[in-house]
Image (spheres, rainbow, N blue to C red):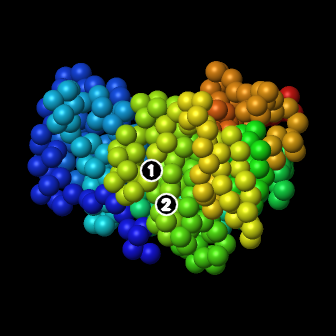
Amino acid sequence: MNEFKEVSENYTLPEAVREAQRCLHCKVPSCKKGCPISNDIPEWIGELAKGNFGNAMSIINARSNLPAVCGRVCGHERQCEGSCVLNKAGKHINIGKLERFVADFDCEADLSHEAIPEQKRGLIAVIGSGPAGLTIAGDLARKGFKVEIFEMESEPGGVLMFGIPEYRLPKEVVRREIKKIQNLGVTFHLLTTAGRDFTIDDLFNRGFDAIFMGTGTGKPKKLPIPGIEHPGVRQAIWFLRRVSLYQSGLIDRKEVIVGNGDKVAVIGCGNTAIDAARTALRMGSSEVTVIYHRTVNEMSALRAEYDEAVAEGVKFMWKSSVVEIEGGTDNRLRSITVDTEGSRSKMEVDRVIMAVGSAPASRIVSTTKGIDVDSKGYVLTREAPYGMTTRRGVFAGGDVTNRPATVVHAMQDAKRVAEGMIQYVDAKRLMEKLDADEISIHNQ
């Protein structure tokens, strides 16, 4: 599958050191302020510039559980690199590429060997192994908690494994990052679904002190367009997952459906829409058009992703909306009607891919008493302890709470939830000890 070879090339060692040496080491580093997880960017870049790769990795590990992932898929142009003082002159430090280099070099040279603390501080269950779940697991394992992750798929990683295309984030990179978390003593239970194979109450009965829900948003949103229920219309997250399963050898090519000379329309213009459009081309589609109701300056996709899509041949229609979908034969479409600033036209398409967001599935909430949600199904959480739901001991974070929008924002939110879980479990354990001491005193 050469079409899915990683697009961005890594630095060589001399290139990475030279790039790191360009850093000005500002007294008040705006790059760090621009990073959602407050990565100590100048510190690890300084170590990299001196060739101290192990030190650089240790500094990164203190803030990030997924550096090889973040180095590839973070929105650097809007965060650390966009905040770099050299960005005004168009010469920002390539922080993402440097982070990726350090993480890859560390893995290939087998430099880091983190000491696993004694894990007796508490027992934590994490439901879902996407960015939020993996961050919770890594942070709490390092703080002395025993963590077990429950994942419905055959492999952990969530959106990192099944939602981001191989050309942007190779699956081996995700597996490598997960292995590091596993090495911290975290246990993974695969092919096990919350609300079907077990419930929240089951986990509490098994002795878990606290539970984290990081199940993301698996239920696609739909637009009220005539013809949208036709089988020629597919959801972007469904399509990207199918491609990932096909590349892993788990399903046949025909089950991906999209490709093979198809004319494809993608509705939406976030990063998922761009991923779906570029992936459709790689699967052999003859023509791919992204249709968006706003302008290029209002899209939520990163500009770099858009530029690469244009270079690969993806077409874009701005200020346009699909108002009707006409079905054809053999589960294919015949055409769509597009409204562009009041002017309507028909466009021949074989497939439509919807990329307009998703909402939380209700499998956990519907099988658990005491977890409140808002009118759209997002889980409600407290500010103190941060991330706890209306059910005591159950925490939630990531997309299921409608807070994050990207991988690193899910990690940012999860780090705050991890602190809330630590506060809760420490307090719970203390009260249990006090109760046990009182019983002991009375029995003397």
Please state the horizontal and vertical placement of residue 373, each as a whole percent of the image. Answer: 78, 30
- For the C terminus, give its image quadrant: top right
Q: Is residue 15 visible?
A: yes
Q: Quadrant of the N terminus?
A: bottom left
Q: Secondary structure at mark 2?
A: strand
In this view, the residue in front, 109 or 221, is: 221
Residue 386, disc: none
What whole-number distance in Å separates the C-alpha atoms at marks 1 and 2? 8 Å
Instruction: Say how many tags the image has.
Output: 2
Instruction: Give the residue type that dot 2 points to.
Output: Glu
Q: Secondary structure at mark 1?
A: strand
Position of 24 relative to 47 (above/below): above
Q: Is residue 393 left or right of residue 294?
A: right
Q: Is residue 213 left or right of residue 271?
A: right
Where residue 135 sits in the image (x, y, percent)? 52, 45
Q: Are marks 1 and 2 in contact (CB under 8 Å)?
A: yes
Q: Earlier in the sequence, mark 1 or mark 2?
A: 2
Camera sees residue 120: no
Q: Nearer the viewer, residue 330 or 59?
A: 330
In the image, what residue occupies the spot 61% across and 58% down? 349
The image position of residue 286, as x and y in percent, is 49, 66
For disc 2, the neighbor class at 10 Å (few under 14, some 14 to 19, many from 20) is some
- In the rendered image, the vertical position of residue 244 relative to residue 32, given as above or below: below
Residue linked to disc 1: 315
**Image coords of residue 181 (percent x, y):** 50, 56
Q: 103 or 119: which is nearer to us?
A: 103
Report the residue at 36% width, 63% height from top.
6
**Residue indicated by mark 2:** 287
- Report the amino acid beneath label 1: Lys
What residue lies at 24% left-to-right and 43% top-to-bottom? Answer: 94
